[in-house]
Image (cartoon, rainbow, N blue to C red):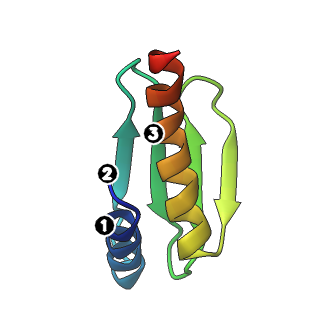
């Protein structure tokens, strides 16, 4: 998944922040991130499936990078 694609998708999510859109990004090992734009804001809420840790971020760029890093961490650990 490419950074620009994720960023555009996140921007679109926030354009429709009055609708409950939730996107799940799943790594091959089954762990996932659930991402949503909080209602009437541009704040992203990211929930880790394994730890249930919740992270909030106001930056589309940082959120996209966070998702890309999460997905690529699986690929790096697999190739080790």
Query: Could you give the CA–CA distance between mark 1 and mark 2, rounded to whole angstroms?
Result: 7 Å
Which label's residue is closer to the chain start, 3 or 2? Answer: 2
Circle 2 — which element?
loop
Answer few, some or many: residues within 10 Å of disc 2's Cα (few below 14, many 20 plus, some between 14 and 19). few
Residue 57 image point, x, y percent:
66, 66
Q: Residue 28: image x %, image y %?
A: 35, 23
Q: How far apart are the two marked residues, 3 and 1, measured between alpha carbons?
A: 14 Å
* Label 3 Cα crowd, 10 Å radius (few <14 / some 14-19 / many 20+): some
Indicate which disc residue 19 carries: none
Q: Nearer the viewer, residue 42 or 31?
A: 31
Where does label 3 land, which residue?
71
- The mark nearer the N terminus, 3 or 1, is 1
Residue under circle 1?
Answer: 5
Whether tag 3 and tag 2 are in contact, CB under 8 A, the answer is yes
Q: Residue at x 41, y 63 (%)?
A: 3
Residue hosting label 2: 1
Q: How many marks?
A: 3
In the image, residue 19 sits, relative to residue 79, either above or below, namely below
Q: Residue at x 34, y 58 (%)?
A: 2
Q: Position of residue 10 (x, y in %)?
A: 40, 70
Mark 1 element type: helix
Q: Give whichever of 32, 5 is nearer the camera.
A: 5
Q: Indicate the position of residue 38 as horizontal and vertical percent values.
A: 53, 68
């Amino acid at each position: 998944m490419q950074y620009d694609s994720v960023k555009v998708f996140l921007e679109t999510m926030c354009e429709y922040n009055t609708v409950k859109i939730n996107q799940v990004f799943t790594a091959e090992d089954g762990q996932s991130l659930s991402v949503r734009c909080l209602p009437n804001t541009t704040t992203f809420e990211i929930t880790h499936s394994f730890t249930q840790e919740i992270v909030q971020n106001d930056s589309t760029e940082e959120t996209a990078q966070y998702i890309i890093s999460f997905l690529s961490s699986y690929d790096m650990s697999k190739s080790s």
